[in-house]
Amino acid sequence: MFTGFTMHRHCPVCALPFERASGEITGGMAINTVLTLIVVVGGGLVFGLNPTVPLAPVIGGLILFAIVFPIGFYRSSRGLWASVLYLMGVNAEPD
């Protein structure tokens, strides 16, 4: 589906378009953002409310996670969104 961080417009095997219209990239971005926020907020609550864990390393780790994880998960989130579009049948609809 990808060459580096660039997603192909069509499937190289069956030529099905991954994203038919501009703006469909926002679904993948939403998946990426929501998953990152869930992990950061959950980790912040679990470790931040525990008085035995020092707060500075927790904040530093969560900030580092919030920067690195979305970059590493980019391709997977775009692939998940392309699969959602495929399962809903939006990719094959005529205009």
Image (tube, rainbow, N blue to C red):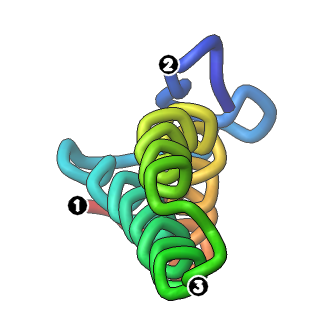
Looking at the image, is 74 positioned above or below residue 5? below
Dot in front, 3 or 1: 3
Q: CA distance from mark 3 to mark 1?
A: 54 Å
**Label 3: element kind:** loop
Q: Residues within 10 Å of mark 2 (few under 14, many from 20)?
A: few
The numbered mark at residue 11 is: none
Q: Residue at x 53, y 34 (%)?
A: 68
Dot in front, 3 or 2: 3
> Which residue occupies the foreground of this view, 6 or 22?
6
> Which residue occupies the foreground of this view, 17 or 71?
71
Q: Residues within 10 Å of mark 3 (few under 14, many from 20)?
A: few
Q: Name the residue tied to disc 2.
A: 6
Q: CA distance from mark 1 to mark 2?
A: 25 Å
Amino acid on which disc 3 is placed? Asn
Dot in front, 1 or 2: 2
Q: Name the residue tied to disc 3.
A: 50
**Label 1: element kind:** loop
Determine whether label 3 and label 2 are within 8 Å by CB: no
- Of marks 3 and 1, which one's residue comes earlier in the chain? 3
> Which residue occupies the foreground of this view, 67 or 72?
67
Q: Residue at x 50, y 19 (%)?
A: 6
Across and down, in percent, residue 52 comes to 65, 77
Determine whether label 3 and label 1 are within 8 Å by CB: no
Q: Name the residue tied to disc 1.
A: 95
- Of marks 1 and 2, which one's residue comes earlier in the chain? 2
